[in-house]
Image: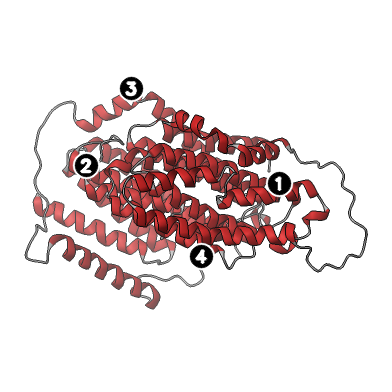
Amino acid sequence: MNPYRRATLLCSVGLGTTLTFASSHWLLAWMGLEINTLAITPLMAQHHHPRAVEATTKYFLTQATAAAMILFASTTNAWMTGEWSINDLSNPIASTMFMAALALKIGLAPMHFWMPEVLQGLDLLTGLILSTWQKLAPLALIIQTAQTIDPLLLTLLGISSTLVGGWGGLNQTQLRKILAYSSIAHMGWMIIVIQYAPQLTLIALGTYIIMTSAAFLTLKMSLTTKISTLATTWSKSPILTSTTALVLLSLGGLPPLTGFMPKWLILQELTKQDLPIIATAMALTALISLYFYLRLLYAMTLTISPNMINSTTPWRTQTTQTSLPLALFTTAALGLLPMAPAILMLTT
Amino acid sequence: MTYFMFLLLMALVVGLVAVASNPTPYFAALGLVVAAGVGCGVLVGHGGSFLSLVLFLIYLGGMLVVFAYAALAAEPFPEAWGSRSVLGYVLVYLLGVGLVAGIFWGGWYEGSWVVVDGLKEFSVLRGDISGVAVMYSSGGGMLVICAWVLLLTLLVVLELTRGLSRGALRAV
């Protein structure tokens, strides 16, 4: 794509999120969300093949529906209470509609159906922007309104998201769909604790962004989109293979890696709030997600799949892609657990 | 006046049903014209006469006319609201409207089918006119962002339809 156009669109995506972050009026927040949707649409369709255009269309329709619902809920709230400010949602109809709309925006179950198909149709970098940056603005709104939303709705959204994220990802062989279901599961973890300790939601969001960026950038570096091609990356870059193994385990939430931090803190907070059954349910659903991360790990590092080796191992020349972001995100995805107290203090 | 507002609101819902039931764009644009027109009438009834005038001129007279010209793409088999596929949608949506009205108003005997009259005042600076003035003064930053969004929409549409028959969105 023309670099001027790409720069303009990326800056507009940034503007949209910034606008939503900075706003206290629902109309301005809605404008920011719409700017995000609008600006990312040509980025998604830049490779003009039908699969990408289909993904763009689906994404645009779902996000536009969610934005229309947000507008409807904010006008309902203004009609009933006269308040346009984000922090004062006193009408239960409006707050429930807001939560449903924002859940549709970030892909929480049961409004998650668009996520795997949309991510599958995109190239890896656009998929990364969709999974990380596009979640920031709606989550900012959710954090601000979480106190006024029905607790049952939040809990249901959280548990069903982790369940769907786990079960849905089990039968997938396409890596982008696996990462989509992993995103759904992580969003579920973020939502479940938002009414008790919003700082844990922020920690979960931060660690999720780091780990998913590491995963997407690894896949981009080795240009793999399926498990079958993932199985041959050992010959192309052994170091990347070993770090990716650890990044996958971090996504699954195993100590002593970074991914353990949000899960640990969230389970602790849930037990402190006297909700042991919900905590157990969350931990068990995380096990399901762990299974498909382990499957990826197994295919990549623990076995060499039957392959017709018609030549010698390929020359491992220096890669032409920028490797600094990948290095940064991988390091952060593996080593941030000892900094948990500092991170907690930063987000409180 | 109450019955007039009731008529306008009913016409709004029927117009929306006419648009949502997937006829050919000719007829959907007609439905949009009707819906926007009666929406302007509702606005006037609530005291926003300036806003209603602006909506009529710019939206109906500018945007919708341009859209109608653009959407008059060659449609070999135009389908109006009487053709089987569209009629199904129309009936289902009207049924849905009746159902939701029944749920929210508690049946046909409870709840008011007509609007409740608001306060009537007459002043030089009405809410809508001073609203426009505020938008240009205190709301200057938001106005700039709105203008940028409009420009962005243009760029997005141009980028999506770039390439004519080789581009992303093409008549297949």
* Tag in front: 3 or 4: 4
Sooner in the amino-acid sequence: mark 4 or mark 2:
2
Q: Which residue corresponds to the image point at 42% horizontal and 61% vertical from the top-left?
A: B26
Q: Please state which of the two labelled residues, at mark 4 or mark 2, is closer to the viewer.
A: 4
Amino acid at pointer 3? Ser
- Image quadrant holding the N terminus of chain A, namely top right
Horizontal side of B128 relative to A52 (left or right) equals: left
Foreground of the two, A104 or B156: A104
Q: Residue furthest left?
A: B109
| Residue occupied by mark 3 | B138
Q: Residues within 10 Å of mark 4 (few under 14, many from 20)?
A: some
User: Mark 2, chain letter?
Assistant: A
Q: CA distance from mark 3 to mark 4?
A: 51 Å
Q: Where in the figure is residue A59, as x and y percent of width and height?
A: 51, 54
Identify the residue under disc 4.
A167
Quarter of the image that includes the C terminus of chain A: top left
Question: Going 51% across and 71% down the picture, which residue do you hit?
Answer: B76
Q: Do pointers 3 and 1 mark residues of a single chain?
A: no
Furthest residue toward bottom:
B84
How packed mark 1 is, by other alpha carbons closer than 10 Å (few <14, some 14-19, many 20 or more), is: some
How far apart in space, not on screen, are marks 2 and 3 (Cα)?
27 Å
Q: Earlier in the sequence, mark 4 or mark 1?
A: 4
Q: Which residue is mark 1?
A: A243
Q: Position of residue A35 (x, y in %)?
A: 47, 40
Q: CA distance from mark 3 to mark 1?
A: 53 Å
Question: Both on one chain, marks 3 and 4?
Answer: no
Give the spatial CA distance, label 4 vs label 1: 26 Å
* Three-letter amino acid code of the residue under disc 1: Thr
Which secondary structure lies at badge 1? helix
The numbered mark 1 sits on a residue in which chain?
Answer: A
* Pointer 2 residue: A90
